[in-house]
Image (cartoon, rainbow, N blue to C red):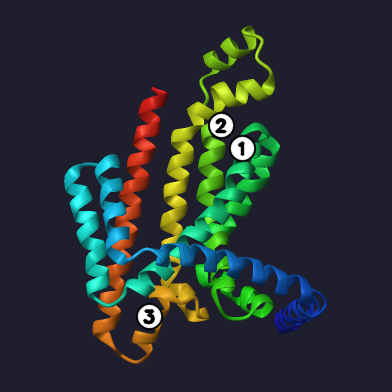
């Protein structure tokens, strides 16, 4: 059976709908792009405000505090190495993109996860949606974003936020639902209001799971860095994409090393913070 008519019709409807949304909502998408790029530029400005050695010292002290002294030394030296390779500006641009996208993803994902943790029907509705988001190839989200927002950091942020949200939603919902039943009964017997029950009992038990969600959201955001370079996101992703196109192998390797340094450092820091949060709960 020839199904080309169905496919062609669906494609035509999709193109028409996207064109209509783009034409009639241009003012809204322009404002949305301005807000996203303004937020990204603000974070990048803060990161570039201090010299590279000061950022490296702060990272070293933070790693020493959260992990151990050796990790502090390694983190500081690794960041200095990014500057030595001549990729400090690109490294900070990537960090700004990942930080901004993760904050936006958590600002949406954690509240949605809390609601899903309390409302089982909402959680059942979310599960297949999150499965779909995590199953589709990440670059798929760049296509409609390019059509509506054009090339640049705003498009990269939207795609990265979409990819980074599911872990935060899932693990926040899981944390809320994992509160031991005996503690809930104790709170009810003590006459706690629903808000007090949430703040004093459910949230503290959910913190370790929420912290794990933050860690996973960060990792998913880093996974979009190179892909987002296709749309002119700037930073290490665009450096790698440009280097691959021009067959500049040395530059692509240097940029890949810088991404690995950032990823491993933030992964270890957030994991350590999650373990500390879990230890306080216990």
- Mark 1 crowd level (few <14, some 14–19, many ≥20, 10 Å Cα): many
Residue furthest out toward the left: 70
Give the secondary structure at mark 1. helix
Residue 281 is situated, as x and y percent measured from the top left of the image, at 42, 25
Q: Is residue 274 above or below residue 96?
A: above
Q: Is 106 placed left or right of 3 in the picture?
A: left
- Mark 2 crowd level (few <14, some 14–19, many ≥20, 10 Å Cα): many
Q: Residue visible at 66% across and 38% down?
A: 115
Q: In this view, does 84 lie above or below 183?
A: below
- Which tag is nearer the camera, tag 2 or tag 3? 3
| Near-viewer residue (205 or 173) | 205
Q: In this view, does 55 lie above or below 238?
A: above
CA gap, disc 1 and disc 2: 7 Å
Residue matched to label 1: 114
Q: Is 166 placed left or right of 90 in the picture?
A: right
Cβ–Cβ under 8 Å for marks 2 and 3: no
**Residue 239: image tag:** 3
Residue matched to label 2: 176
First in sequence: mark 3 or mark 1? 1
Q: Split into 4 quadrants, where in the image is the C terminus?
A: top left
Q: Quadrant of residue 140?
A: bottom right
First in sequence: mark 1 or mark 2? 1
CA gap, disc 2 and disc 3: 41 Å
């Amino acid at each position: 059976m020839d199904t080309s008519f169905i496919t062609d019709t669906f494609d035509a409807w999709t193109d028409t709908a996207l064109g209509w949304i783009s034409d009639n909502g241009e003012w809204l998408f322009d404002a949305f792009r301005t807000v996203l790029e303004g937020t990204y530029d603000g974070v990048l400005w803060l990161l570039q405000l201090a010299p590279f050695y000061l950022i490296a010292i702060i990272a070293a002290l933070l790693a020493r505090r959260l992990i151990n002294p050796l990790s502090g030394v390694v983190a500081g030296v690794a960041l200095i190495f990014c500057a030595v390779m001549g990729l400090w500006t690109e490294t900070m641009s990537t960090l700004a993109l990942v930080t901004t996208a993760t904050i936006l993803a958590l600002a949406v994902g954690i509240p949605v996860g809390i609601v899903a943790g309390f409302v089982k029907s909402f959680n059942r509705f979310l599960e297949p949606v999150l499965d779909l988001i995590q199953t589709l190839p990440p670059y798929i989200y760049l296509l409609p974003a390019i059509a509506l927002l054009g090339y640049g950091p705003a498009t990269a942020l939207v795609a990265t936020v979409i990819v980074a949200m599911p872990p935060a939603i899932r693990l926040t919902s899981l944390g809320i639902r994992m509160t031991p039943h005996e503690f809930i009964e104790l709170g009810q017997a003590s006459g706690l209001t629903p808000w007090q029950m949430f703040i004093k009992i459910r949230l503290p038990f959910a913190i370790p799971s929420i912290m794990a969600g933050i860690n996973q959201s960060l990792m998913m955001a880093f996974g979009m860095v190179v892909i987002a370079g296709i749309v002119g996101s700037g930073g290490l992703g665009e450096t790698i994409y440009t280097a691959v196109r021009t067959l500049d192998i040395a530059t692509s390797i240097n940029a890949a090393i810088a991404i690995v340094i950032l990823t491993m450092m933030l992964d270890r820091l957030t994991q350590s913070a999650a373990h500390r949060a879990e230890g306080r709960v216990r």
